[in-house]
Amino acid sequence: MRRLPVLLLLLAAACGSPVDTTYAGDPLVTLRGEASLSATDRPDGPVRLTLAWYPGIVDDSAVPPSAPASILTEDVPFQSTFPADFALPLHQPPPEKARVAVGGQVRGRAATGFLLAYRDLNGNQRLDPLPAGGGGPSQDRVVGSSWGGFDSYVLLYLEETQEPGTGLKRGFNLLHITVDGGGVVPLDTPIPLALSAGGPLLDLLACEVAWDGLPESEPPCGISFEPPPPPPGTLSVWGTVSLAGRTVTVNLYLTRDDERLSDATVTLGGRPVPYVPERLGHFLEEADSTLLTEGGTVELVARQGDSVTRGLLTVPEGFDITSPAPGGQLRSGAGLDVAWTAAAGAAGYNVELRSPDGLQQSFAFTSERSVTLLPVSYEGPATLRVAAVTRPSAFSRYGWLEVECVRTQPLTVVP
């Protein structure tokens, strides 16, 4: 979270839209997009938009700020129904203190900004950075951001004309960062902005010491990453929902006040998932199923009495194992290099080597598209399993649910 590597921002082989920074009109540029709400995790009051500039992000050699260098705030009247279109006009370029010399592939100085949505809890019509010791009950809360890891929109301002091969222009540039790297996109590209009740990762975007380049305080800005305990009586959902080819496997267990439940009901896409006593949970397996599709979305509902937990599950899609080749051999005691293409919608990948009895011989989780599994002492036939994983936010606060899209490959472990 400290700093975004400069190479992530210097995305080549993509075309951006030129910006005439001598244009005397007002605004210089307008960021547009669509704000959306989930069914269960949403802000509890009015929301404002701002653009925060972070000079320490574009280059690790830059002198870092003690806080976001500038926060430009504009009122945006969100509609009472969502999704809602928004427009954030920028009436001036980033301030001088937000610009730093970058070097490398980029000429001159640059500034990098994230679009933030926030709850103005102290009513002063601006986003106040969190002090090192943390804020009080009236401290503003960040509830949405254009920065979201491998699906992010970043505004990059450049003072000088750049090499044509970079796709970057003098003035404002909009970058769409994806798991494949991404590139420069037109400035009028709609920016999706998911609004929530907020949380530690969003609060870090307003934390002073998170961007100062010094050793982190414990915890930074008083932000705790320990999940709060669920309210009494909350249904928590744990387990996996997997799609491998046309085979669907649902393996879940439910808790309420730290007790496992056997009398709760679970439906997936309206289909009951039965409770199986031998598994101490809800289990469903269909070898030729239409319940899930790659890239498809389905609703999961857990219910016990008057307590209900629900959310939408989206299955990652479209990836393949590229290495090793099917039917290949692995020597016992040697590591296994595994590589695959990107899966749309995946937050990461579970990679494991299994023996025929289903035992896990080696395992790794990564957000990259390659990994080396640790050596195994096992010998015989084995299955390489790569699962593209997403973790629905509706369940992440009160449980641990993974949605998998699975690819497998047969291997043989030889002496």
Image: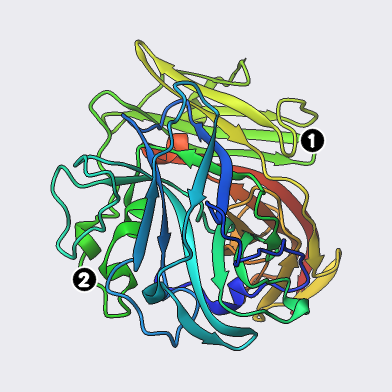
The mark nearer the N terminus, 2 or 1, is: 2
Which of the pair 210/258 is nearer the observer? 210
Q: Name the residue under label 1.
A: 246
Residue at disc 1, secondary structure: loop
The C terminus, quarter of image: bottom right
Residue 99 is tagged as none
Q: Where is residue 6 in the image (x, y as percent from the top left)?
A: 55, 78
| Residue 411 vertical position relative to residue 59 in the rendered view, above or below | above
**Few, some or many C-alpha atoms within 10 Å of disc 2 (few <14, some 14-19, many ≥20)?**
few
Q: Where is residue 38 in the image (x, y as percent from the top left)?
A: 48, 30
| Residue 145 vertical position relative to residue 16 in the rendered view, above or below | above
**Few, some or many C-alpha atoms within 10 Å of disc 1 (few <14, some 14-19, many ≥20)?**
some
Q: Nearer the viewer, mark 2 or mark 1?
A: 2
Q: Which amino acid is tagged 1?
A: Arg
- What residue occupies the far top of the structure in this picture? 305
Q: Where is residue 92 in the image (x, y as percent from the top left)?
A: 46, 60
Which of the pair 299/140 is nearer the observer? 140
Q: Position of residue 25 (x, y in %)?
A: 56, 54
Residue at disc 2, secondary structure: loop
The N terminus, quarter of image: bottom left
The answer to which image quadrant residue 150 occupies is bottom right
- What residue occupies the far front of the structure in this picture? 24
The answer to which image quadrant residue 362 occupies is bottom right
Instruction: Residue at 45% x, 32% y: name it.
Output: 253
| Residue 296 vertical position relative to residue 379 in the rendered view, above or below | above
Instruction: Residue at 81% x, 73% y: name it.
Output: 329
Q: Mark 2 points at which residue?
A: 217
The answer, for residue 376, to whether it is visible in the render is: no
**Do the residues under discs 2 and 1 have CB atoms within 8 angstroms?**
no
Instruction: Residue at 62% x, 66% y: name it.
Output: 368
Q: Which amino acid is tagged 2?
A: Ser
